[in-house]
Amino acid sequence: MSAHTIHSTAHPQSRDRLLGTPATDHALGALALAAGYYATAQIGEALAFPNAPVSALWLPNALVMGALLLAPRRYWWFYLLAVLPAHLLVQLPLPDVTIARVVIQYVLNCGTALIGALALAHFEPGAHRFNRVLPAWRLVFFGGLIAPFTTSLIMAALFVTTDVDRNFWLTTVVRALTNSFAILTVVPLMVHMADRLRAPRQAFDVPRLIEGSLITLCLAAACVAALFAPPIPAVASAAMLCLPLPMLLWAAARFGVAGSSAATLLLGILAICGALAGAGPFMAEPAAHATLSVVLFLVVTGIPLLLLGAALDERRSLERAREASDALHGAVLASIQDQMVVLDSDGRIVDANESWRQIGERAPAAPFVTLKVGENLLHHCIEAGAKGDALATRLGTCCAEVFGGRAQHHRIEYAAHAPNGITWFEVTIEPLRRPEGGAVLVWTDVTYRKQSEAKERAQQQQLVHLGRAAVLGELSGAFAHELTQPLTSILGNAEAALQLLTKPDVDLREIRNMVRDIVADDVRAAEVIQRLRAMLQRGEISREPVDLTNVVRDVLDLARIDLLTRHVSVDVVFDPYLPLVLGDRIQLQQVVLNLVVNACEAMTSLEVHKRRISITARFEGSTCEVLCAIRDRGAGVASDDLERIFQPFVTTKTQGLGMGLAICRSIIEAHGGRLWAQNEPDGGATFTFSAKMGS
């Protein structure tokens, strides 16, 4: 990915405004670079180093490196080519200048800027900033050391080869140090200025402007006193160099990298001018050595100041990020309607939102909701639990398990008495994802959810009851026939007994037998009515151990007349060691009855001798469930409808609402089981449901 692509992603609009993609914008940028190169090169030639063909203060290479870092990489060649006329205008008029020297200096000047820019762009492809320690170190290493020293060695060797200069090491060291100083001061300033231009317009900070001006004046005064004033016999010359140090530290501390770079550049300009003029603490040495000592002093001073400014900028940036994070954290907590508290690993409340502070007014029945930040919720729960508060004991236990890592999360529901009635809360306990540990507790008002669940349960029970009534309605003829038989027998025995009682010689033994028959028929009719009442009875779902074998038998007794009328035979195969299941007896009877009636209706078109239902029940050890399967010999179910038939209002009957199987599945799922259908290879369909084993 090119540097241009990344830059345009980071600042698409501002970059187009400063150094945008249109050629006219880059032409203006290249023209400005050429003008700056020419002006600083003229200054550099005026500050030529004694006894060496280089300058004591050479800023053009730093300008080129800064421009390359700010421009998209695909335009670098344009900027490098733009400085060629400026370089020729400066170098060619000089006396005793050869074409070879001009070409060597241009190529290696561009090489210095190009090596540093490529290295920095490689390690930080995005927008370049030196307000962090690591990028500042990279600038020092690659821009301030590798690039200038590499090209200076090459330039000195070429100068020796072309007889431009014979002093190889002096040329190498002086050029490397002067370029290093310029790069370490000018490049950060250019990047900072570009960032300021990209940023939205802001009002001038007058206090900072005054402070910056004051630093500049104090630094300039200190530099003049230390570098231009005559030496004081009572003060060592080296001690005078410490005079600007407080201002340099002031600039770095208050203005970061930009302040330290600007202050060091000002110090360098004044120090080099003083050294070339024969003033300052280095005047006792030969001119060349004095100037070299000044440049070395500037580089050694500039590097730690640059890193100090970067470290302070990075710290300020981290502090701003932390303040923003804290502000966002507070805003998020304040925006959450649920009650939230944050606990440390000891159970002490370290933070809470505003909703938590109001929960005590809504539900004062919970004793721990009145705690404030700084109090220990875990200890309070332990103390309340010791007094018999079961909820506090449970909450404290769950918090301790989360603190100790024995549980990933907990969820508790409880009801509290509030002025407007009972309020339900759900407490969620999650571990706090930080090395110190802790937990986050969230109180959520679930009163409306509980009310909705209660309404849903009531509607579900009503629907199930209607389903039972609908199934029994289909069997009403069979029930009427089953009741008619004992009632007719009771009536016949009663009339016969009355006739016998009119005779003078009454046979009491025969009358006694008739009465016994009446009682038996009455019990038989009562059993039919009792089964009907049980199936039609409405009430809450009860969970108790149920013998599924008896459930199936009761259903078959209930549907006996209907099975006989339809000429359907039933084969029953039960596991002799079938365990009890946990469920509601009446609802399980409803499921079995519905499936048996459906099986009978599926075989209506078959010949009488083929109408057979198979009912099996077995224990599945792998899942600890009891499986009950009801199979018919009908036409089966279309493969596309095997799952769809369990949806409400989906039916394959000519007359039917399509609610039977939907109700059956909801009943079985409410029992924690499953209900599914499958076609058999030899014909017919099997409906199987599972039920959890009970004790």
Image: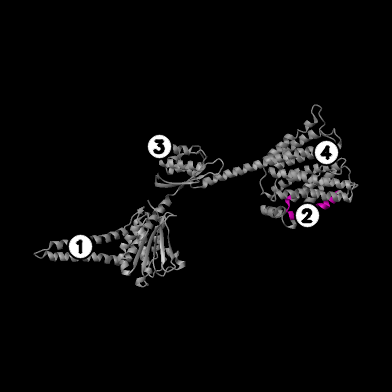
Looking at the rendered structure, the secondary structure element under dot 1 is: helix
Residue picked out by circle 3 = 387
Q: Main secondary structure of the magenta part?
A: helix
Q: Secondary structure at mark 2?
A: helix
- The amino acid at mark 4 is Leu
Q: Which mark is residue 292?
A: 4
Q: Amino acid at mark 1?
A: Asp
Q: CA distance from mark 4 to mark 2?
A: 33 Å
Q: Is disc 2 surrounded by few (<14), some (14 to 19) or many (20+) residues within 10 Å? A: few
Q: Is residue 202 magenta?
A: no
Q: Which residue is mark 2?
A: 77
Type of the residue with mark 3: Lys
Q: Tell me which numbered mark, 3 or 4, is placed earlier along the sequence.
A: 4
Q: Amino acid at mark 2?
A: Trp
Front of the two marks 1 and 2: 1
Distance from disc 1 to disc 2, alpha carbons, whole Å, reads: 118 Å
The answer to whether 518 appears left or right of 225 in the picture is: left
Task: Residue 2 in the image: state x and y as whole percent.
Answer: 71, 55
Q: What residue is rendered at 82% in x and 30% in y?
A: 231
**Residue 682 against residue 334 in the figure, above or below:** below
Say the numbered circle drawn on residue 517: 1
* The magenta segment: 69-90
Pick whichever of labels 1 and 2 is earlier in the sequence: 2
Under circle 3, the secondary element is loop
Disc 3 versus disc 2: distance between alpha carbons?
82 Å
Dot 4 or dot 1, earlier in sequence: 4
Out of 126 and 605, give the one closest to the viewer: 605
Quarter occupied by residue 235: top right
